[in-house]
């Protein structure tokens, strides 16, 4: 059992602590199967040295390309220490994201440059830079979230209080650091508390990285860990799987538990620097307790609101979206009699029909997927009624028509099980894939706009 370690208030404090450690911070592997390691002390010295160069050369906002290397991590830490705001670009994320990141950085840079005083200093800006992350954009256009090294370090500490790691642990880091969940849970948490972080090799070898590195802890999104499970790619040394970023199907958690693994589900948002609740009762992974300092409340309409020391500064270029110091998450949930948080879904996953009746889209989508076998389904609101959109349809008209005919029959079967007022009124097909986030969640805002 690990003791709860100190709460770091900045990257400077964290990097100075690295200088006192003798253990291995980072392990890397190459395509030929060779490995290399960097100690905490060497890692710290690299960051400090690079930060002096960055101070002399960088602008106010920099895009740092993360390529799963030690040098990439050094760039991130050194730029923040030098006072630069950092946007992390990852070549593995969906096409267009990195271009969007570059454009956002240029806009942010222009805004910062306009704030310089007569001595060339940015007014009101002292100390470390911010990290700028993008929201997933499931229900609206993506926004840029301003996080600090303090909020991110506090998030790592609160996670450590609920699920401890330490020297002797090896954490497989194969999540994108351009997302707050990946940044905190697959990198910062492990480095803050003395574990060794193994940087995944190549996206095409993801399912083989567990057998290659032999981690004791894997943070992942459900689709990643499901793929590893299906391909029997989980190593015998593995003891903990931390799942976040998207809802985890019950069968997946049960399958992992049957292998003797401790399964933790985490809930959090970019705006809260990642996790605010996590599993503690391992026999019920989907029942989560609030993390230290996270004041979670269920509002009258079922929406989850939170006040936390890990809160964002706000959205770049916008006023902070807080009410009485609370952030309204857009998620729906409830507390059970033990004070454990359960999630139902997104508030915007609920459609209000013309008669005031409400439906929960994921329930419809999952049920019709099971009936039809078609995976790319989404429910939207059209003329006050629920309409099913089926994506990734064949471009051949005859084949598409045949599949649609079968789908319509399955929808009719589904409709027969629910009240008439809440039935699917129409089926729309498209050869395009439905818009989704990197973790597979439907971007309902975009899907709705496509068929307005």
Image: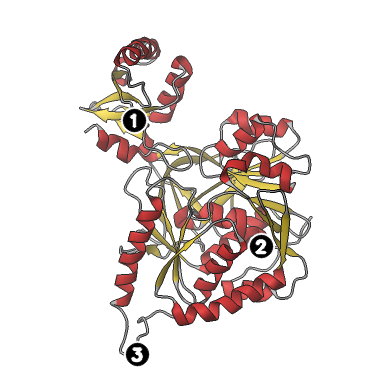
Under circle 3, the secondary element is loop
Report the front residue among 46 and 234.
46
Report the front residue among 422 and 318.
318
Asked if residue 417 lies left or right of residue 75, the reply is: left
**Gap between marks 2 and 3, in whole Å?**
37 Å
Q: Where the N terminus falls, by quadrant?
A: bottom right
Query: Percent position (x, y) of residue 160?
Result: 66, 57
**Mark 3 vs mark 1: in front:** 1
In primary-sequence order, the first of circles 2 and 1 is 2
Which residue is drawn at the image coordinates 78% and 39% (left, top)? Answer: 236
One can see residue 224 in this view: yes
Give residue 110's quadrant in the image: bottom left
Residue under circle 1? 432
Asked if residue 135 lies left or right of residue 173, the reply is: left
Query: Percent position (x, y) of residue 322?
Result: 37, 59
Which residue is drawn at the image coordinates 35% and 51% (left, top)? Answer: 142
Q: How is the image coloured?
A: secondary structure
One can see residue 216 in this view: no
Q: Mark 2 Cα within 10 Å, few/some/many (few <14, many 20+)? A: many
């Amino acid at each position: 059992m690990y003791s709860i370690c100190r709460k770091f208030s900045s990257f400077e404090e964290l990097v100075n602590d690295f200088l006192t450690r003798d253990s291995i911070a980072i392990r890397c592997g190459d395509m030929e199967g060779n490995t290399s390691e960097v100690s905490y002390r060497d890692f710290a010295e690299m960051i400090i040295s690079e930060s002096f160069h960055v101070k002399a050369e960088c602008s106010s906002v920099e895009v740092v390309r993360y390529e799963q290397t030690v040098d990439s991590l050094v760039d991130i830490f050194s730029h923040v220490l030098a006072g630069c705001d950092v946007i992390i670009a990852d070549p593995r994320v969906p096409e267009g994201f990195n271009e969007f990141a570059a454009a956002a950085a240029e806009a942010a840079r222009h805004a910062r440059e306009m704030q310089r005083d007569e001595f060339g200093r940015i007014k009101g800006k002292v100390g470390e830079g911010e990290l700028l992350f993008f929201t997933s954009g499931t229900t609206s256009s993506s926004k840029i979230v301003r996080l600090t090294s303090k909020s991110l370090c506090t998030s790592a500490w609160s996670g450590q209080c609920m699920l401890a790691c330490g020297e002797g642990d090896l954490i497989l880091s194969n999540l994108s650091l351009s997302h707050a969940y990946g940044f905190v849970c697959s990198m910062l948490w492990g480095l803050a508390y003395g574990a060794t972080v193994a940087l995944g090799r190549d996206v095409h070898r993801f399912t083989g990285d567990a057998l290659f590195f032999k981690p004791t802890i894997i943070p992942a999104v459900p689709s990643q860990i499901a793929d590893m499970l299906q391909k029997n790619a989980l190593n015998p040394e593995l003891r903990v799987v931390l799942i976040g970023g998207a809802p985890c199907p019950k069968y997946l958690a049960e399958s992992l538990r049957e292998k003797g693994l401790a399964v933790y589900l985490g809930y959090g948002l970019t705006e809260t620097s990642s996790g605010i609740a996590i599993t503690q009762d391992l026999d019920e992974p989907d029942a989560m307790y609030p993390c230290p300092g996270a004041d979670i409340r269920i509002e009258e309409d079922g929406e989850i609101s939170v006040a936390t020391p890990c809160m964002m500064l706000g959205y770049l270029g916008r006023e902070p979206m807080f009410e009485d110091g609370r952030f309204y998450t857009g998620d729906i949930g409830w507390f059970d009699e033990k004070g454990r948080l359960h999630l139902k879904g997104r508030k915007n996953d609920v459609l209000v029909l013309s008669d005031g009746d409400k439906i929960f889209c994921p329930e419809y989508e999952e049920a019709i997927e099971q009936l039809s076998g078609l995976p790319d389904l989404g429910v939207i609101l059209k003329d006050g009624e629920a309409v099913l959109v089926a994506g990734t349809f064949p471009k051949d008209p005859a084949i598409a028509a045949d599949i649609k005919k079968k789908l319509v029959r399955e929808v009719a079967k589904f409709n027969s099980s629910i009240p008439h007022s809440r039935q699917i009124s129409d089926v729309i097909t498209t050869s395009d894939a439905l818009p989704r986030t990197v973790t597979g969640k439907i971007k309902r805002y975009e899907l709705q706009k496509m068929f307005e």
